Amino acid sequence: MVSEAPPFWWKKSDWRAWALYPLSWIYGSIARARLEKAPRVPVGAPVICVGNFTVGGAGKTPTALALAEAARKAGASPGFLSRGYRGSLRTTTLVDPSRHNARDVGDEPMLLAARAPTVVSPDRLDGARHLIGEGVDLIIMDDGFQSASILFDYALLVVDADRGIGNGHVIPGGPMRAPMLDQMRHATALLVIGDGYAADGVIRSAGRAAKPIFKARLVVPEARRFRDRLFLAFAAIGNPDKFFETLQSTGARIVERRSFGDHHTFTEDEIRELLDQARKQGLEIVTTGKDMVRLSAGHGPAEDLAARADVLEVELQLERSDVLKTMVEQAIAVFKKRGLAAPAASRGPEAD
C-alpha cells in the first residue's frame, strides 16, 4: 500500500491524474472484483470493520479505540485485528506491549494493544480465530475493508471532512482504494470526522445509497496543558496537517512544523535535526501517538527524541453519544441472526 501519497492526489484532478487513468481503471477493476468475490468466511464472533475510502489517515484508529470502549460498556470483550503494516513479524501474533515494539508489529497495533487484546496476522481469518481463542467475543478490524477474507457484521467507512477523497481517482492516479460506488455498496454506514466540506460528495453518495451517516470530531482530552506553549511539531502520519490543526486548536503555538510520509522510519540524521532545531530555538517538541511508538522502538537519538517529545492524545467524540453503542449492538444482532452465536466460538476453529 502507498505510504508516500503524491500531493496532486489531494487537489482537483489535473493532467497527472488523467494520464494515469488507464492504470487507475485497471487497479479499480481488480479492487472491484476483490470486493465482489472475496470469500468472506464467517468466524465465531461478531466482526466490525473500520475502513476508509483512501490511503492515508482518516481517523480509523481513534474510531476503533472508541468502538472498543463502547463494546466494553455494552458487556462485550472486544479485541483488535490488524495486518500489522510495516511490522517485521509474518506470523499470527498476539501483541505483547512489554515484549513487542513498532518494528515487530507496526505502530497502530501498539496503540491498540494498550487498550484491548490485539492480534496481527497476514491471514485475517487465522488472526480472528486466534483472538477468539484469547477470549475475545467481538472483533474490531483496523482496516481491511477492501481485502479481508472474513465476513463483516458491520462495515464502517470513515472519511475526513476536511480532506475528503482527494481528486476521487483510484490508485495510482489518486488516493482511492477502489471505485466509490463499489465501496459504498459494501459499507454499512459512513462516519464523517471533522467540520469541513471536502466530504460532501461522499455524504451525498451515502445518502443516495441509503447508508446511515454519522458525524464526529477529534478532541484533545488534556487540551489545557498545551495552551501558550511554543512547539516544534512533527508528524509522520497520513494527514500531518490534521495533527497541526488539532494542536493549534488547543492554543499551542507551532513555531516549527515537520511533515513526513505515513509510517515513516526516522533516520538518525532526521532525528538529530529535530533535536538540534528545538534546542536552538528553545522549543518544546510534540508529536503523535503513532510517531511516539515508532520512536520508542529505537535506540540512541531515537530514545533521546522520545524522552523529550510530548504526545498530543486525541479521542473521538460523536455528535450523538449513543451511536457507537448502537453500532456494537447492530453487529451483535447481525451475527446472531446468521446463527453463529456463542456456541460456535466454544467449539473452536474447526467449527468454522
Image: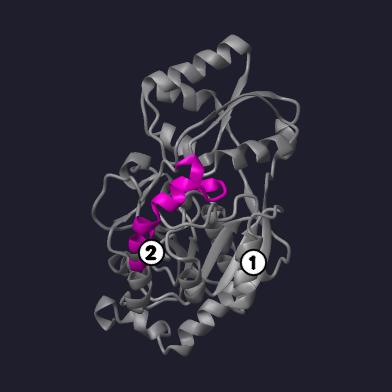
Location of mark 2 (residue): 28
Q: Which residue is mark 1?
A: 203
Q: Which residues are magenta?
A: 6-29
Q: Residues within 10 Å of mark 1 (few under 14, many from 20)?
A: many
Magenta-span inclusion, residue 155: no
At a point 53% along the width and 51% down the height, the residue shown is 13
Location of residue 27 in the rendering, given as x and y in whole percent from the top left corner: 34, 60
Q: Earlier in the sequence, mark 1 or mark 2?
A: 2
**In terms of secondary structure, where does tag 2 sit?**
helix
**Residue 74 in view of the camera:** no
- Report which quarter residue 107 is drawn in: top left
Residue 352 lies, with reference to residue 7, above or below; the image says below
- Mark 1–mark 2 Cα distance, whole angstroms, equals 21 Å
Are circles 1 and 2 on residues that touch, CB within 8 Å? Answer: no
Q: Is residue 32 left or right of residue 351?
A: right
Q: Residues within 10 Å of mark 2 (few under 14, many from 20)?
A: many
Predominant SS of the magenta segment = helix
Q: Amino acid at mark 2?
A: Gly
- Whole-percent x and y of residue 5? 44, 43
Q: Nearer the viewer, mark 1 or mark 2?
A: 2
